Image (spheres, coloured by chain):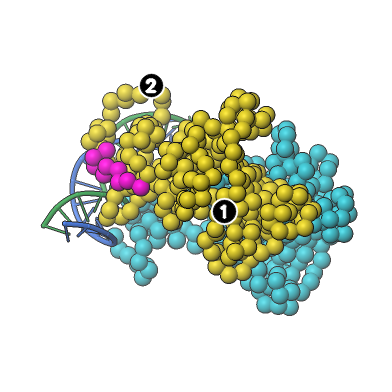
Chain colours: A yellow, B cyan, C blue, D green
Amino acid sequence: MSSESPTFSPLYRQIKGLMIQALEAGEWQPGQLIPSEQEFALRFGVSQGTVRKAIDELAAENLLVRRQGKGTFVATHQDPRALFRFLRLVPVEGQLSTPESIPLECWRAKAGVEAARMLGLRQGDPIMIVRRLLRFEGKPVVIDEIYLSGEQFKGLTLELLQSWTSSLYSLFENRFGVRMIRASESIRAVAADRSAAEALKVPEGKPLLSVERVTYTYGDKPVEWRRGLYMTDEHFYLNELN
Amino acid sequence: MSSESPTFSPLYRQIKGLMIQALEAGEWQPGQLIPSEQEFALRFGVSQGTVRKAIDELAAENLLVRRQGKGTFVATHQDPRALFRFLRLVPVEGQLSTPESIPLECWRAKAGVEAARMLGLRQGDPIMIVRRLLRFEGKPVVIDEIYLSGEQFKGLTLELLQSWTSSLYSLFENRFGVRMIRASESIRAVAADRSAAEALKVPEGKPLLSVERVTYTYGDKPVEWRRGLYMTDEHFYLNELN
DNA sequence: AAGTGGTCTAGACCACGTC
DNA sequence: ACGTGGTCTAGACCACTTT
């Protein structure tokens, strides 16, 4: 109908854009119910079908979650179904048990060349670094080193990490208002160095999976860079290609 | 309308199922134009919108490709855009150049326990095994060992492999009528054994990425099992998480 | 000009969850 | 009973490609 936006794209994409803006602005919090399709249709002056198509895409991108009969909700890392959305690790045999996250260290630092590039910061900008271990059934399997913008994660401490029982991303969402939307992982095989060998209790030189992840929030803004070393004797990284 | 199918699912899914059957039966060949949405609507006695939703899903799953103004086509591994649909390898720096595939060996064998399980065969059933090397810019980067059902790939020879200039999957599609739809990869870090070390020209014990892939055709039928060893000093496995 | 997929609408009815 | 998302329809018009 009345196209109030100058960018040329289908109506439903414009609607989608408006809804992303609203999400970004925090109009509804993670886990909360958003208005019904009819309400949006009235609000934006389009048909319900057009709103539907916008929401379809947002749901496909995991920004929203539809629940028939109940309504549409803002996706959250609290949700058990999304708890390990970005963890592709699967045991060679048996069921995937919930890993236990053990924060080891947490300190302030200044961004080096690489961290700055990955996080879209300038070299020397303040960052936070976290080291943590993931254990499955009591056995150490992953050692992570996580780099975060110091600006956004100012109040992060080892105590806070240790007191938090749910996933890291749900902590970021709750305490720092940062919602992780998508991630990009670069995977290599490396030999365990001294520090990794100690943490994972394997001999030095042991082949490990190196998984570097950049995680993005709304607007493709990178907010986390992490490097994980995975022990892949009893687990493997599972990737479905479609 | 008149629901001739006993399974209870939305109409558009039933339509989708019928279209998959037609694809499987080879009613249209890879790369070919299929009937228009209107024609399908008449053929199945449903509205055009319902056909559209069925095709939407098939296109999302890469079975079909839409081209505005032209029509809808059966996806093909010939298509340059799909040539390396399942290869996630990216150079650390520079552009991704097209790899060179060098078939090394090709022989008949009997399925072992593992190959039989992966390919849905019985132990002892005939299989084909192919070893081949992938080189990027002249450098060996991937050594693959590929297991195929002997039934379906009876005429496969080293000569045929060497004479084929396009991707393996386009060969399978053209000469054996087997179209690969999706795949599942299990990734580990391993130490190079003697044979891999020789092929990739790295020292024995060098950490390599082990990528085991099961590839499926229509109806989730496994038809290929392969194990690739990737040298990840100058390349890495890129995975986008959404 | 004609045919294709792509968008948008309006309205009907179904399936699910809550009250 | 009511409100939600999910399906299905019919028809209009737009954008792209070919004739």
* Amino acid marked by disc 1: Ile
Using the numbered discs, state the Cα–Cα distance from disc 2 to disc 1 in whole angstroms: 50 Å
Circle number at residue A102: 1
Judged from the image, the secondary structure of the residue bearing numbered disc 2 is loop
**Residue that extends furthest to the front in the rendered view of this protein:** A159
Judged from the image, the secondary structure of the residue bearing numbered disc 1 is strand
Figure check: B73 above or below A148: below
The residue that appears at 51% across and 50% down in the rendered structure is A162
Q: Which residue is mark 2?
A: A6
**Residue that extends furthest to the top in the rendered view of this protein:** A6
Residue B35 in view of the camera:
no
The residue that appears at 57% across and 50% down in the rendered structure is A103
Which residues make up the magenta segment? Answer: A31-40
- Residue A15: name its quadrant: top left
The answer to whether residue A33 is magenta is yes
- Residue A46: name its quadrant: top left
Q: Quadrant of the N terminus of chain A?
A: top left
Q: Are marks 2 and 1 on the same chain?
A: yes
Marked residue nearer the N-terminal end (2 or 1) = 2
